Amino acid sequence: MAEEKLPTRAEDFSEWYNQLVLKAQLADYAPVRGCMVVRPYGWALWENITAALDRRFKATGHQNVAFPMLIPRSFIDKEKHHVEGFSPELAVVTIGGGEELAEPLVIRPTSETIIGHMWSKWIQSYRDLPVLMNQWNSVVRWELRTKLFLRTLEFYWQEGHTAHATREEAEAETRQMLDIYTDFAVNDAAIPVIPGKKSDAEKFAGADHTFSIEAMMGDGKALQAGTSHFLGENFAQAFDVKYLDQHGQQQFCWTTSWGLSTRFIGAIIMVHGDDQGLVLPPKLAPYQVVIVPIYKTDEERASVQGVARKLKEELAKANIRVTLDEREGPSPGWKFNDWEMRGVPLRVELGPKDVAKQSAVLARRDRPGREGKVSASLADLPRTVETLLVEIQQAIHDKALAFRKSHTQDATTYEELKRAVETGFAFSHWCGSAECEAKIKEEARATMRCIPLDQDNEKSAHGGQCVYCGKPAAKRAIFARAY
């Protein structure tokens, strides 16, 4: 069974990514251009992401709901910035049941409008607030340039929607959800992210402010990995979402929305992957451990497989996600390569000599070759595996953080910025003007990713000159080329 090698990341990062998604059986191209089919291995990864987030959402008082995917076209038109932002991407249904519809229906690009409509019925008094909701669904945005997971016509995500009595509460919610995304990215996905505020040019259509978590991919480009929006009273005014306050006065609600999608899988692939394939964080990997039995004769096979099955049971009892590769035909070496390509954090190699010695060889995915191999006794294998998984989780985070730091430059001049964005991030003073931002985008092909919330260092503290126009600038921003 000959296995075609992936292109290296240095040769062609984009093609390495495309082929890896297909070969690792995460997803495939659908018959409709721009859509994807998520395969079981990819969906298992997504389920682990959803579980990690859902747990956090519920712990902060959010409840899951389900709203329809079909939205009256007139709803989208009610909030002027929203319609401007989404009109080019809408998929519209005009015929139903063989007849032309009286009003066209939009397949949801996001749900602020239909939720606003329902809230206007449900929210009457300050006693009904806050409303804290989230839904897991898919949305459709008619994208022209697509890439599996990163940008598809239909994608899966969660969209949180909340309504509050005061501006302060809504702003606190917006920041809380950004913190939750940051915590998930760093601690579960082992991806160091930069939480920050978007510029007006880059904010969500209809928001007062947008915050995002930005991650550096393995080619130095940025990826917006999650967003949290403070919507002010914009949607409440458009959909008449009001409440009676304690003094009997009618007030508009303050609302938020926030989302993280299947593009996060793209982030995991591009942040941690190497030339051999995926490197999955143990906390999210569909399988944390794979056991590969090694034998030549039928007699060896019987003894090795018996021990391997027992090991699998023991690991599963210890709540470790484990699979046993009993495929007939492929050689152990082929299986090693296959599981390496699929990014399983830890491989257990078990042959007749290991069984005789009551030990096994453990191979870490994050450290290829001899360096990543350790011998471990079968008696306390679950404990050894647990310890190693914690080490791997930390090691891949630290590696990604070191990569980001080494590819981020404190660019004080425009020439330095242009050089920095060729290979990574430029961290530069920016005056806040849309004109400077547009010029940098046009000339350096780099966007202002975010103004990091953490500005606490000498260079930011004393202010500086805008990297483009030289005028005084109080804060620094991250500029980068992005997906």
Image (tube, grey):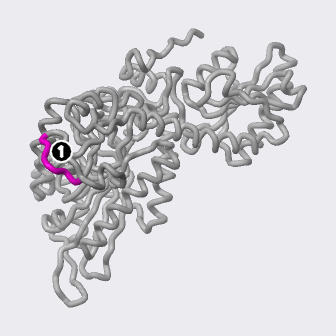
Residue drawn at 17 percent across, 43 percent down: 92
In the displayed orientation, state which residue is furthest to the right. Answer: 356
**Secondary structure beneath label 1:** loop
Name which quarter of the figure residue 253 lies in: bottom left
Q: Position of residue 461 (x, y in %)?
A: 30, 55
Q: Quadrant of the N terminus?
A: top right
- Identify the residue shown where x is 19% and y is 75%: 242
Residue farthest along the bottom direction in this orientation: 247
Q: Quadrant of the C terminus?
A: top left
Q: Residues within 10 Å of mark 1 (few under 14, many from 20)?
A: many
Residue placed most toward the observer, 479 or 359: 479
Seen from the viewer's position, the closer of residues 384 and 423 is: 423
State left or right for residue 94 relative to residue 16.
Answer: left
Counting the numbered discs, the total is: 1
Looking at the magenta stretch, what is its main secondary structure? Answer: loop
Going 22% across and 79% down the picture, which residue do you hit?
243
In this rendering, does residue 295 appear at all?
A: yes
Q: In the displayed structure, does residue 306 sit left or right of residue 137?
A: right
Find out whether residue 77 is within the magenta segment. no
- Span of residues in magenta: 469-474
Q: Residue at x 60, y 26 (%)?
A: 339
**Residue 473 within the magenta-colored segment of the rendering:** yes
Image side of residue 44 versus residue 326, left or right: left
Say if 72 sits above or below 284 in the image.
below
> Which percent across, then down, holds residue 126?
28, 81
Residue 12: percent from the left, percent from the top? 38, 17
Instruction: Tell me if residue 70 can be seen.
Output: no
Q: Mark 1 — residue?
A: 466
Give the x, y percent position of residue 200. 17, 51
Q: Is residue 134 above or below residue 268?
A: below
- The amino acid type, in three-letter code, at marker 1 is Cys
